[in-house]
Amino acid sequence: MSGETNLTKLLASMSPACDNMMYGFATLPSKDAQGLSFVPKCMFQEDEGITVIATIDQLVDNNIECMGPFACITLTVHSSLEAVGLTAAFATALGKADISANVVAAYYHDHIFVAWEDRDSAMATLNALPEHN
């Protein structure tokens, strides 16, 4: 399954969904990330260490300092990793609404982390996006 590449179709069918969990972003030395007692939403290796995205509860329960809380909005359309313009379209719309977006592109879907207090505005902005294209 390669996913959708047509930007018009992607925008019309992106169907954003917020899971209403509070997430945090943390960074750990590579050696510390190996022994996590929970499965994070995302881990990414950077030169400085491992970025971990997990629920605030998971991070706090494991005494891991984090930034947050953030909400995770998933675009439920199966977008191709080769699709052009989707990230730019939603990032531009969120930027115009003064909403910071931290994006993780996974194999099937794009996941947008926004400040917890911005989640409703972000959902409204994303849901309105197909109407403007």
Image: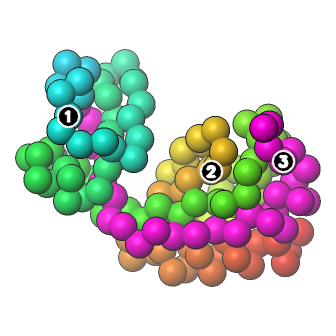
Q: Is residue 95 above or below residue 131?
A: above
| N-terminal label among 2 and 3 | 3
Mark closer to the observer (2, 3)? 3
Q: Is residue 121 above or below residue 32?
A: below
The image quadrant that residue 131 belongs to is: bottom right
Q: Is residue 84 left or right of residue 87?
A: right
Residue 83: x, y in percent?
Answer: 81, 41
Q: Is residue 16 above or below residue 131?
A: above
Q: What mark, if any, has residue 11 been given in the picture?
A: none
Name the quarter where the C terminus is drawn.
Answer: bottom right
Mark closer to the observer (1, 2)? 1
Q: Amino acid at mark 3?
A: Glu
Residue that appears at 16% across and 47% down: 65
For the residue labelled by badge 2, is the local secondary structure a helix, a strand or a loop? Answer: strand
Q: Magenta segment, which residues?
A: 1-29
Residue ID for mark 1: 36
In depth, the one of 124 and 20 nearer the eye is 20
Q: What mark, if any, has residue 4 been given in the picture?
A: 3
Q: Amino acid at mark 1?
A: Leu
Q: What mark, if any, has residue 110 been given in the picture?
A: 2
Q: Dots 2 and 3: beta carbons under 8 Å?
A: no
* Residue 99 showing in the rendered view: no
| N-terminal label among 1 and 2 | 1
Residue 98: x, y in percent?
Answer: 55, 70
Q: Is residue 108 left or right of residue 74?
A: right
Q: Is residue 98 left or right of residue 86?
A: left
Mark 1 vs mark 2, CA separation in Å: 25 Å
Q: Amino acid at mark 2?
A: Asp
Residue that appears at 80% across and 37% down: 2
Mark 2 vs mark 3, CA separation in Å: 12 Å
Q: Dots 3 and 1: beta carbons under 8 Å?
A: no
In depth, the one of 36 and 66 nearer the eye is 36
